[in-house]
Image (cartoon, rainbow, N blue to C red):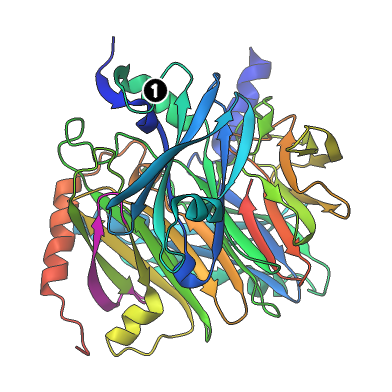
Amino acid sequence: MLKTLLPRLYYSTFFNKSSIGQLYIVSEDIDTYFCFNNHKGFLFPQADEQLTIKLDVHSSSGKKILSKNFNLNAHDSLSVSIRDLLKEKLTIGKEEILGSIVCTTPKTTLQNHFYTYYRDDKTESVAMIHPQSTVGRKTTDRSWISNQIIHTKDLENITLYQMNHSRGTSSCHYYLRSVADGSIFAEADVSVKQLGVTKVKFDLTDSPAQLCLSLDNLLSPNGKPLIMRRYKNNKFTINHG
Amino acid sequence: MGKSISIQGKNIIIFYCSSLKTLGLESRVSLPNKTGENTNAYVQVFTTSGEFVQEKSLDEVADKSIIAVELNDLYRDFQLDSTFDYVFLFSLIPANYTPSDFQDIELGEVSRLNSTQDFYIEHYIESSISAGVLYQASPVMNNKSIIPQFYFFMQAPKIFLSEHQDTIFQFFNPNISREPENSKLYFFIRESNGDILCKGELNVSSNGMSMLSVKETLQNNNITPPNGFLHFEAFSDEAIFITLTMQYNKSLETMDLEHTLSPHYYLQKNKMDKKSTHSYYSDLYNSHVNKSV
């Protein structure tokens, strides 16, 4: 009894149910912007209420790096450069720095579905993605098959970025299968710490024309990996799997 | 027994999307089937002003399988004008249904069938780049016999502008009844401090699609588009719209596509007074005067 109750108490204290997470990618070239607004002020405009939003930035191993509060008036919005925030703590070079951002609003206001905006300064490649999962939930123990076909004709490679929104370290096994015959083109294991992020790159030389991604253990409800398509012209797009 | 609706087979499991020839893009869709039964794919084509054009059966999509459809193939098959955009209403028809016969089906089953998978639209430039997004639709959307009054609210700091990059919103007005109807939405483009840069309105026909270029909208209001992020708000009491946001840099050929979340994602427990919120924004809209017009 105690064994099952303690983790529940710990996680309900540590994690607010309205905490939502998404991963960031930062390098000399790529920045991630945390884009949010006063959603309560929009949905209940008569109240004209301020909203305080807390942002926690975690490393790729899930360790908290920094924490910052933002106050917004009713129709305010903000887009915050994660690279600028990290510059105070880390040296940023060519290598990608990965990690997670967790957004928490006061319990009464429920969830702020912020957007993450990824941008490459050199190629002006862009991607905007909504958050997918609240943090601190159990792993699903469910397999998952993507609903999108990856057309490989113009692609150099794809990179899967995986955040772990769930409690504790979790693992999964990726499969890239040919849509035509179901054969496995490539596969890989990843293990991700709580609130951590990892990535795995698949070279697409000699790949089938159409691939479909699947995995054996979805790390959290809707906790699908982000798929970065890197094209032969070096531009990229990212979407959630 | 839950509440049922009478519905044609071709309108049970649906997905609205469009081509974007007017932006110089090619398009393809992924149609997965996770319903637990075999289905046949079907497509209905409409103009962007919602006029029905043609329809036909496509390939079988067996349970746990996925197919790709190139919209260029449908342009060829239907002899569509390649300089125009069209709305494509794809569907998966369960094997025991015909496309046109009406059958009663429980709303719960309709919801289950439409929520078991997303569908994927991907726009691309040959030998360059593509961008796609997964989302769902439902035949219940804008069905007044089930939901008599619709409220639509959209919010997000989703606009990013640079010298060459525009943010373009696509609004679809799903309506499987094919009733010709024009629904209006109203919007504000705001700066990050909440100040309204400009307001505007947009008509979206039933089964049609309307686009809103943020740069063009600002320029039409004699406002020089600033570089960086802006905030967008929209509202309507005439229809529910499927909304996609495209970041598009035509000069450098970079782009992105994302869908929008409805208010219930933000407010799962708090009951929102939609009528009152809509009244607030209507009053604000009517009282605001665009500075430069």
Which residue occupies the foreground of this view, A160 or B141?
A: B141
- Quadrant in the picture for residue A205: bottom right
The answer to whether any part of residue A78 appears in the image is no
Which residue occupies the foreground of this view, B147 or B132?
A: B132
Question: Would you place residue A141 above or below residue A36 in this image?
Answer: above
- Helix, strand or loop under label 1: loop
Which residue occupies the foreground of this view, A153 or B228?
A: A153
The magenta-colored residue range is B190-208
Which residue occupies the foreground of this view, B137 or A209?
A: A209
Residue B194 magenta-highlighted = yes
Residue B281 location in percent, x, y?
18, 62
Residue A122 magenta-highlighted = no
- The residue drawn where x is 66% and y is 71% is A31
- Give the residue pinned by disc 1: B98
B224 relative to B258 in the view: left or right? left
Residue A134 location in percent, x, y?
55, 41
